[in-house]
Amino acid sequence: MSGKRRTQMAAAGVALGASLAACGAGHEVVAGPSAAIPSSTPTATPTASASPGSTPAAAMHRVAPSADAPVAATVAGINQFAIDLYRVGAKPGDNFVFSPLSVAYAFGMLRAGAKGETGDQIDKAFGFPAGVAEAFNALTKGLVTSTAPPQASPQPSANSIPAPAPPVLTIANSLFVQAGYPLEQEFLNTLGQQYGSTVRETDFGDESAALAAINHWADVHTAGRIKQILEHLDPATRLALLNAVYLKASWTTAFDQAGEDKFRGVTKPVQMIDSDGRYGYAKGTGWQAVQLPYFGGRLAMRVVLPTGATTPADLMTPAVLAAAGRTLPAYVNVTMPKWDFRSDLDLIPLLKTLGITDVFGPADLSGITTAEALYVDQALHKANITVDELGTTAAAVTAITARAVSAVAGPTPPIIFTVDRPFVFEIVDTKTGALLFIGSVANPSAK
């Protein structure tokens, strides 16, 4: 399939990274070692995020990130975790997507209250260094473009291509806690000051109201892309930790529609898009890769395409993904499918395979509360991604619940990069190397 020339759109560089504002106003929790969450309503809480069945509680103000926060070590650990989770979670022949960043944020918050072997297992699986909470604070400040919940964009007209817009990237954290439940002050401080987490009282004994509150939060913070993260709650649930990551990013230059073409392993032709231009390109034994920038320059998608007998799973190694990131400018004709699908993951069996066992019972979560023993009874992750000629929209939510134990044109011919077989993709922050989303496409037409 031949590439098409197009009119390039103006792409003024827009730097990502708005500083995070405080996540809520209200009364600061100043009680002793164990503090019951107050039920005052913070005046700065956005109306759109007010969840039915829950009461906004006072939240600590986020502090300025530490200049020496271990961001590089944290990113390296998360990226290795992404490879490990893909290895145990992806199934041959199926599409797969998840947000390593979202899962890591949720377990980073849980780590703030985990002690002993429980904490050590989390650190080992995620590669968390000392000071990981400070690293997440710094990473958030560098990545997010807004602290407000994202808004769904109207569908563009079929007859007009909108100009590329700066990316929208939001990261939200929240703690839902049983009304009046005593939490350790240091745990609350970490969630508020480093993660910017909101705190909401709810009654887990009223399952329908608690589910409505949590699922409403997920809906709001993914602009409606994930309307339900939890389906049930045990009456003995004491708290739920949630993270949401939302991304909407335009290609620097829009692709062209390229009709339908064959895709290996799929019986019906799939919708394709194509582009000619100067892109980052790399290749190695059994693979080739192209880096497709989003408007603004900091975020990009890497498509890593197997060659020969190589499979997508074979490419999920630190060596290959690192090499795929070392691209050089080249004139490339990129033809690839559009895709739009989701993945729903029960993280518990996957994380047990990766060595996290104690947190699912018996656990040492005494850094959260000393009132009773807790263990994690649900750890769920949902992610979806839409890729078309204009760009990418993706969202992910991770939920952890804990319950009581007792209860440009070049002079040379273009490189032909035709994505007509199963492949791997990553959405990366090119400044830190952090993986926002990662996955593989076996059938672009599948939902």
Image: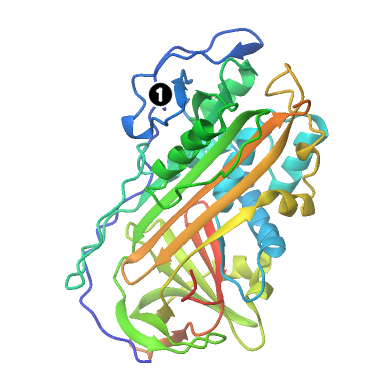
Residue 365 vs 281, above or below: the answer is: above
How many numbered markers are drawn? 1
- Residue extending farthest left: 159
Residue 437's place in the image compared with 260, above or below, is: above
What residue lies at 40% left-to-right and 56% top-to-bottom? 298
Which residue is more in the foreground, 188 or 446?
446
Q: Amino acid at mark 1?
A: Gly
Query: Looking at the picture, how far across and down is residue 11, in whole percent?
Result: 25, 62
Would you place residue 132 above or below residue 29 in this image? below
Q: Nearer the viewer, residue 418 or 258?
A: 258
* Whether residue 400 is situated above or below residue 184 in the rendered picture: below
Mark 1 is surrounded, within 10 Å at the Cα level, by few (under 14), some (14 to 19) or many (20 or more) other residues, namely: many
Position of residue 299 measured from the top left corner of the image (x, y, whole percent): 42, 57
Residue shown at the point (38%, 81%) measured from the top left: 272
> Considering depth in this image, is 411 or 33 the residue closer to the camera?
33
* Residue 380 is at least partly visible in this image: yes
| Frontmost residue, 139 versus 103 | 103
409 relative to 405 in the view: left or right: left
Say which residue appears at 21% left-offset and 72% top-offset.
158
The residue labelled by disc 1 is 24
Q: How is the image coloured?
A: rainbow
Rendered location of residue 153, percent (x, y): 28, 54
Q: Quadrant of residue 122?
A: top right
